Image (cartoon, grey):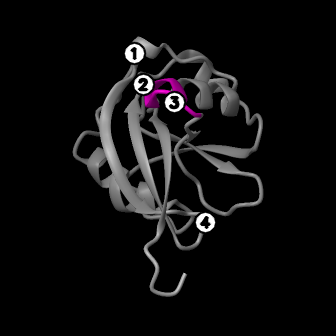
Amino acid sequence: MNGAEPRTIRVSAVVMRDADGRVLNVRKRGTASLMLPGGKHEPGELAIDTAVREFGEELGVSLERDALRLIGVFRARAANEPGHVVEATVFEHPFVAPAGSARPHAEIEALEWVDPRDRRSDMAPLNTDVIFPKLIGDTAPHSP
């Protein structure tokens, strides 16, 4: 994309932390970067509904829509689409017991609980450049 503006991919994502403050991340099949669970909006779908739907599809865990708290809308270089930026509406959901035994579904190949203070090269730019630095100032465990 020589000289062209990067294309924007709009998604919703969910931050869920365990009792140790680690954040649940997923890696999609055929990719190298870990990222927050979430995905692209369907036509006419609200960002909060995308977050609930995608989390369920990817991990087999149902979230309570009313328990989601908006963290914000953030932009970063897309991890898997060169020349694109991701614009993510990011929510936080309290830890729920089924998440402790979540399993990859749909296009998800792996999941991992990651300490946001860890410096890792296998993380999506949205995590390393935006979300994790924001969470480091607020790393108290979030439980029901």
For image coordinates 40% across by 40% down, the residue present is: 89
Q: Classify 92 as above or below 23.
A: above
- Gap between marks 4 and 3, in whole Å? 20 Å
Labels 4 and 3: the sequence-earlier one: 3
Disc marking residue 51? 3
Q: Check disc 3 and give the amino acid type.
A: Ala
- Residue 42 is left or right of residue 93, and the answer is right
Q: Are marks 1 and 2 in contact (CB under 8 Å)?
A: yes
Marks 1/4 in contact by CB < 8 Å: the verdict is no
| Disc 1 to disc 4, C-alpha distance | 31 Å
Sequence-wise, which precedes: disc 4 or disc 2? 4
The residue indicated by pointer 2 is: 93
Residue annotated with mark 1: 67
Secondary structure beneath disc 3?
helix
Give me the disc on residue 81.
4
Counting the numbered discs, the total is 4
Answer with mark 3 or mark 1, whichever residue precedes in sequence: 3
Give the label, 1 or 4, closer to the camera: 4
Query: Seen from this angle, which residue lies furthest left?
Result: 137
Q: Is residue 136 magenta?
A: no
For the point 59% across and 29% down, the residue is 55
Picture coordinates of residue 25, whole percent (x, y): 56, 44
Label 1 amino acid? Ala
**Residue type for callout 4:** Glu
Q: Say whether residue 45 is magenta.
A: yes
* Magenta span: 43-50
